Amino acid sequence: MTREYWKTRSGFILAAVGSAAGLGNIWRFPWMTAENGGSAFLLLYLLVVGLVSVPAVLGEFIIGRRAQCNPVSALHALSGSRTWRAVGLIFSVGTMIFLLSFYSVVGGWIVRYLADSATGAYFGAPGQHFDAISFGPAAVGFQALFLGVTALIVAGGVQRGIELAAKVMVPAIVAVLMMLAVIALTLDGAGAGYGFFLGVNWTYLQGNFLAVLGDATGQALFTLSVGAGNMIIYASYLGTDRSLLTDGLVIALVNVLIGVITGLVVFPLLFALGVGPGGHGPGAVFVSLAQAFETLPMGRLVGVVFYTVVLLAALSSAINMLEVIVSFVIDEFGLDRQVTVAGLTVLFLFTGGVNAMEPGVFNFVANTLIDLLLYLGLTAFLLFAAWVLGGRALEELTAGGGTVAQTVAGPWRYWVGAVIPVFLMFTFFSTTASAAGYNVPIHWVGAAAVVSVGAAIGVLSRTNTFQRRELDSVSE
């Protein structure tokens, strides 16, 4: 079966930005920022994006373009190891099943709120309205509608479906968000929102550093779509003439810009209208903002416009999630794309339906499980790029990248092969301990992270388990 490729560079970048800048920025980012001290969260988030997410995006790009196939087949083909195939199955296909299962529920909420904005159904009691519609049979129905639209786009293929949709949706998201940011700027009292979002709260940061760091790291990985093979699959449709470094930086910059613009919409609006920023968790965008829309002139119109943007963002990310699994099935079993999409849609109607019916399941998956899987998955992908691919990773990074890529290639390998994995495992252990209710000393957590990563590097460097085949023959 002939493999598809991106028709244009802009199509690839917009599709990757759409995957990264979906609900991660417009739903999850305001919620996480509000729950973690506003500017304190923003500061750590920006640092993690620059120091962790951008190098990590390059790692996934390298694996994807080198192998020209889905994440599971890529790890297997490039290593010759069934163990790495199992790693791909768990941390790409497995993570994506959990991810899209809860994500489609949120997508259903957005479809519902888009319709309810036109009628003003949530005006008067937004909190009670969200509680009434967020879970249950109606939520299952709207989740199914969202999945159906996602499936139609993915069934169209890479160029006629995903790329075409991205070229329409991503510019529309940016344009409408900028318009809403201008509206928020004109409101009396908006200054308090800018202060909450942009003025660094050092006291809060010092008192809650580890908690904020964990959430900021999870958000940085979630919003740039790394850790589950999202960027591996999109890079697998790339030609060898593209600069991975340039494309990665552009995608990260536009993604961060969309997140910041979202903050410049949400927080000035909430503070100007006297609505508190926190306390509603995953429903923040549907409760706090819904309450604000009620008091705005032409609030129904503003609500329709806002939730239209959120829906476009949700679709752009859901498309990528479904494509990861679709590509795996097509590559592995040679099935027709439309048949594959139809079968997987049925699967997600069931798994998403469970999340739509059970709030406890949804909250565990969305708040804890996904972050932990992304920490482990990204650690595995980066160790693979640095120590299994080794010299081949450097060849792939520098291909089409010019002198800048050649300069950063060597330091990049050791940064993603040692420093970032230690950081990710530190965050994984601290988050796990916190979720379990244990207060573990920070130096114990750090020691566990160093030992675990060191052991993994030792195994990869000294044994033939992963059949390295002299991958480090390129002198450094």
Image: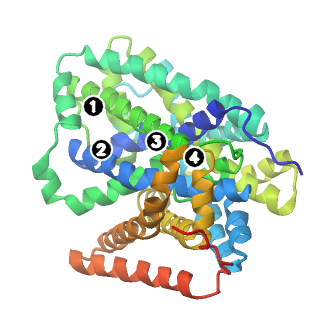
Label 3 element class: helix
Query: Which marked residue is nearer to the observer: mark 1 or mark 4?
Result: 4
In percent of width and height, residue 275 lies at 23, 31
Tell me which residue sits at (59%, 88%) in the image.
463
Distance Cα–Cα, label 4 vs label 2: 30 Å
**Quick check: 364 above or below 233?**
below
Query: Which marked residue is nearer to the observer: mark 4 or mark 2?
Result: 4
Label 4 element class: helix
Query: Which marked residue is nearer to the observer: mark 2 or mark 3?
Result: 3
Residue pointed to by mark 4: 244
Distance Cα–Cα, label 1 vs label 3: 22 Å
Query: Which amino acid lies under the numbered mark 2 shown in the image of this protein?
Result: Thr
- Sooner in the amino-acid sequence: mark 1 or mark 3: 3
Q: Which mark, by number, is residue 252?
A: 3
Asked whether the beta carbons under mark 1 and mark 3 sit within 8 Å of each other, the answer is no
- Sooner in the amino-acid sequence: mark 4 or mark 2: 2
Label 2 element class: helix
Find residue 178 and report its image quarter: top left
Name the residue at the left extreme.
203
**Quick check: 176 above or below 322?**
above
**Quick check: 365 above or below 111?**
below
Distance Cα–Cα, label 3 vs label 4: 12 Å
Residue 29 visible in the snapshot: yes
Q: Which mark, by number, is residue 267?
A: 1
**Quick check: 259 above or below 35?**
above
Distance Cα–Cα, label 1 vs label 4: 34 Å
Query: Which amino acid lies under the numbered mark 4 shown in the image of this protein?
Result: Leu
In percent of width and height, residue 328 lies at 74, 58
Residue pointed to by mark 2: 33
Dot 4 alpha-carbon crowd within 10 angstroms: few under 14, some 14 to 19, many 20 or more: many
- Sooner in the amino-acid sequence: mark 3 or mark 4: 4
